[in-house]
Image (cartoon, rainbow, N blue to C red):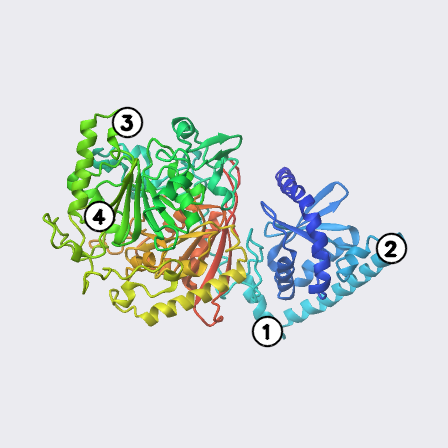
């Protein structure tokens, strides 16, 4: 009983905090209800508080409870009644098993006669009802504030109506049990799988009485995942600091991906730290990050004079400065715009190497340019974590010995602002890798050492001869790559890659050309000191991968890789049909999750991006999408995604396993994504579990999704019904709330959609995984 009282106090604390804010909205809602819901069967609803935070959306709750009421949903959904009488709170547990609608409604009706209001918990979501008004029309809510005589007469009438309703539902329940209303019997069977909870930040207004499908998994065993130890709060499995120190430091090998073996992997839920809060919405998040989310102050001291980051009370403030732009990123970007076309949409995608806290990428959004930033997990603790908390695309990564996880000809621009990469070493291998990922005609920006070494060698505390040699090597490599130097002023130098190889045929020194036939096959492939060939052209003025189209025109234009037939079996018509299909899918998502494009979800991941049409349908200044291309996908279309002006990355939760050919029945070792925990607001998983079926353990993928998903973040699964039933059973033990719905084309389509929301919980809480 003490546990129940503690739970009560905890929930009521959250409830009381919302009361004042809800009051004004309640009055507006009552007036709206008179116009829009004259037949509402539950007009006594005051407001609802889904745990642990409240959203004020009673119309959606009305619809959900109404659907449950008439389809027998109360028989499995209504678990607790929290009865309010004066200052006392009395929890009454209602039976969950084999209860008909009448039994539940009879219990509710008896409480109506005794108390003025009740606090109803349906799957841990709270609904407060004024039961004196429950049998009246919406206007009765306001009328109860009239004179006492009216109140007494209306109260008597309310009791009379409720008793009558009880009799009606008794007859209805008996009829359902008699075996005659077959339609309702089927509905009851379907609602055995119903999840009537109103998930936090998800408003369900479907036409289904319960979850899609009729397979009852109530008896299936659920594995409850326990929280990991608090020391794993910021755990990055493939960039673990302790493991990194066991690898050679040469060429930054120790900062590359080194994932744990099977017996080292964690099989638990990574907790959020105490005090964790949802990040600020964009664009406020660009300038402010809650201290509790990433409490690392070292950069505020180390980079104090460079305006990277400042600690102010309970937030970090990012003034927009950087090592090479201490007076602000805006002025720095405007200087670049005098050389590079940043203002007309021609340059859309950028790569920021050694990004710091990604202020360059953050301020590029003003010019509708999206930057993929990367930096290692090193002594600058949490720089990539800060970038993602700010709502800026970033991954943990390094230029070492492995190729960058991006396709050839991907970026319009690459950037290094004092990124400490030794560009002139290893026979120019790093600059050749930049050349591979740059589009023909793309720009490379280098600011900081060794540019302007004559004036800065003393401040940099490096010998001027060393810096002079370093710049000479960079200039020589750029010449061999056939880059044109466009600008050098102060500490900034800009080169441009030629638009085709025709401009390079006559140069004296020709670099070695890469022999590999697949320039996009980069996952765990060693970097090479060779140049990736241009696509063939017919004349010197032709751009090797097609003329650049400005953004947003290029978002839906047919990409060069499609029009040229570079990707087998994907025609122009197939590409256009894919666009149309995903617009329809996304519209269906928005009807269920109405806040997808509201700004609540800033960092979005598409785990199986295809042609990028999901991201294209969502395109908005309020959000960005990390389009992930699994390397085992039937077709590699990540290059198409970049041509559309979107960004993405290669990744595989099922890496090449040398034992797989010998042991085909053994599941592969799944690998983690190169990011910190709690860095994505919404994850889209289209067909990902069908793709990895018999290759990777579904639990491993789901645990990784849980790691990178923020508390109260959402997931949309799209897959075959049998696959989603398995997924739903697993996430029951992961503190996720779920709701399965039919395909937008109807219930006969085997593909279904499973919506999920990760519950809010933090380290140190003595709570267990939800069974919902």
**CA–CA distance between discs 3 and 4?**
27 Å
Is label 3 in contact with label 4 (beta carbons under 8 Å)? Answer: no
Please identify the quadrant where the N terminus is shown: top right
Q: Is residue 586 depicted above or below 315 in this figure?
A: below
Q: Find residue 400 and report its horizontal and vertical position in percent.
A: 23, 40
- The residue identified by callout 3 is 460
- The residue identified by callout 4 is 484
**CA–CA distance between discs 2 and 3?**
85 Å
Q: Find residue 550 and report its horizontal and vertical position in percent.
A: 36, 58
Number of the front mark, 4 or 2: 4
**CA–CA distance between discs 2 and 1?**
41 Å
Disc 1 or 3, which lies upstream in sequence?
1
Q: Residue at x 32, y 47 (%)?
A: 339
Q: Residue at x 53, y 37 (%)?
A: 766
Disc 4 or 2, which lies upstream in sequence?
2
**Within 10 angstroms of label 3, few (less than 14), some, or many (20 or more) residues?**
some
**CA–CA distance between discs 4 and 2?**
88 Å
Q: Quadrant of residue 717?
A: bottom left
| Residue 237 visible in image | yes
Is label 2 in contact with label 3 (beta carbons under 8 Å)? Answer: no
Left or right: 589 with respect to 198?
Answer: left
**CA–CA distance between discs 1 and 3?**
80 Å
Disc 3 or 4, which lies upstream in sequence?
3
Is label 4 in contact with label 1 (beta carbons under 8 Å)? Answer: no
User: Mark on residue 85?
Assistant: none
- The residue identified by callout 1 is 183
User: Mark on residue 152?
Assistant: 2
**Within 10 angstroms of label 4, few (less than 14), some, or many (20 or more) residues?**
some
Looking at the rendered structure, the secondary structure element under dot 1 is: helix
Q: Nearer the viewer, residue 261 or 514?
A: 514
């Amino acid at each position: 009983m003490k546990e129940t009282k503690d739970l009560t106090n905890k929930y009521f604390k959250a409830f009381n905090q919302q009361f004042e804010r809800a009051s004004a909205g309640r009055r507006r809602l009552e007036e709206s209800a008179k116009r829009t819901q004259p037949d509402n069967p539950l007009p006594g609803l005051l407001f609802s508080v889904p745990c642990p935070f409240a959203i004020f959306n009673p119309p959606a709750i009305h619809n959900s409870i109404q659907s449950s009421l008439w389809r027998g949903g109360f028989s499995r959904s209504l678990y607790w009644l929290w009865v309010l009488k004066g200052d006392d709170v009395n929890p009454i547990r209602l039976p969950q098993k084999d209860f008909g609608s009448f039994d539940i409604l009879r219990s509710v009706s008896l409480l109506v006669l005794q108390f003025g209001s009740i606090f109803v918990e349906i799957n841990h979501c709270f609904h407060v009802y004024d039961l004196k008004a429950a049998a009246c029309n919406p206007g009765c809510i306001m009328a109860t504030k009239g004179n006492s005589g009216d109140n007494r007469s209306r109260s008597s009438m309310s009791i009379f109506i409720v008793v009558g309703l009880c009799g009606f539902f008794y007859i209805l329940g008996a009829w359902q049990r008699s075996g005659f209303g077959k339609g309702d019997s089927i509905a009851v069977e379907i609602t055995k799988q119903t999840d009537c909870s109103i998930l936090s930040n998800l408003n369900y207004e479907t036409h289904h009485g319960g979850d899609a499908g009729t397979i009852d998994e109530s008896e299936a065993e659920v594995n409850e995942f326990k929280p990991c130890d608090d020391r794993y709060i910021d755990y990055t499995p493939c960039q673990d600091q302790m493991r990194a120190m066991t690898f050679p430091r040469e060429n930054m090998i120790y900062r590359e991906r080194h994932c744990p073996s099977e017996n080292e992997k964690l099989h638990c839920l990574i907790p959020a730290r105490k005090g964790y809060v949802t990040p600020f919405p964009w664009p406020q998040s660009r300038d402010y990050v809650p201290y509790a989310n990433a409490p690392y102050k070292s950069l505020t001291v180390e980079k104090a004079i460079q305006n990277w980051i400042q600690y102010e009370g309970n937030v970090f403030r990012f003034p927009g400065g950087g090592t090479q732009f201490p007076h602000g990123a805006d002025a720095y970007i405007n200087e670049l715009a005098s050389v590079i076309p940043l203002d007309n949409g021609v340059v859309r995608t950028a790569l920021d190497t050694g990004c710091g806290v990604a202020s360059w990428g953050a301020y590029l959004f003003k010019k509708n340019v999206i930057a993929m930033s990367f930096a290692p997990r090193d002594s600058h603790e949490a720089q990539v974590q800060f970038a993602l908390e700010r709502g800026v695309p970033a991954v943990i990564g390094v230029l070492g010995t492995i190729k960058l996880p991006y396709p050839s000809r991907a970026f319009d621009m690459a950037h290094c602002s004092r990124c400490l990469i030794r560009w002139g070493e290893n026979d120019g291998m790093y600059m050749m890798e930049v050349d591979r990922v740059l589009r023909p005609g793309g720009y490379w920006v280098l600011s900081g050492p060794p540019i302007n070494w004559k004036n800065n060698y003393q401040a940099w505390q490096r010998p001027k001869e060393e810096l002079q040699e370093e710049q000479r090597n960079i200039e020589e490599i750029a010449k061999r790559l056939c880059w044109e130097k466009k600008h050098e002023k102060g500490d900034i130098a800009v080169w441009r890659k030629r638009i085709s190889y025709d401009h390079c045929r006559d140069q004296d020194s020709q670099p070695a050309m890469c022999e590999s036939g697949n320039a996009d096959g980069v996952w765990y492939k060693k970097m090479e000191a060779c140049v990736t060939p241009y696509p063939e052209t017919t004349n010197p003025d032709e751009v090797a991968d097609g003329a650049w189209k400005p953004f947003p025109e290029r978002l839906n234009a047919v990409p060069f890789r499609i029009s040229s037939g570079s990707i087998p079996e994907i025609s122009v018509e197939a590409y256009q049909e894919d666009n149309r299909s995903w617009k329809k899918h996304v519209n269906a998502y928005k009807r269920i999750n109405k806040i997808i494009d509201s700004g609540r979800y800033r960092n979005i991941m598409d785990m199986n991006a295809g042609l990028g049409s999901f991201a294209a349908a969502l395109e908005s200044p309020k959000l960005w999408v990390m389009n992930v291309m699994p390397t085992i996908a039937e077709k590699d279309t990540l290059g198409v995604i970049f041509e559309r002006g979107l960004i993405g990355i290669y990744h595989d939760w099922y890496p090449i396993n040398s034992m797989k050919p010998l042991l085909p029945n053994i599941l592969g070792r799944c690998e983690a994504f190169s990011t910190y925990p709690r860095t994505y607001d919404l994850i889209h998983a289209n067909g990902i579990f069908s793709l990895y079926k018999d290759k990777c353990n579904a639990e491993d993928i789901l645990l990784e999704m849980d790691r990178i998903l923020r508390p109260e973040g959402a997931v949309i699964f799209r897959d075959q019904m049998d696959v989603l039933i398995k997924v739903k059973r697993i996430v029951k033990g992961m503190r996720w709330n779920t709701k399965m719905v039919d395909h937008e084309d109807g219930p006969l389509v085997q593909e279904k959609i499973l919506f999920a929301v990760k519950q809010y919980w933090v380290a140190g809480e003595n709570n267990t995984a939800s069974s919902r």
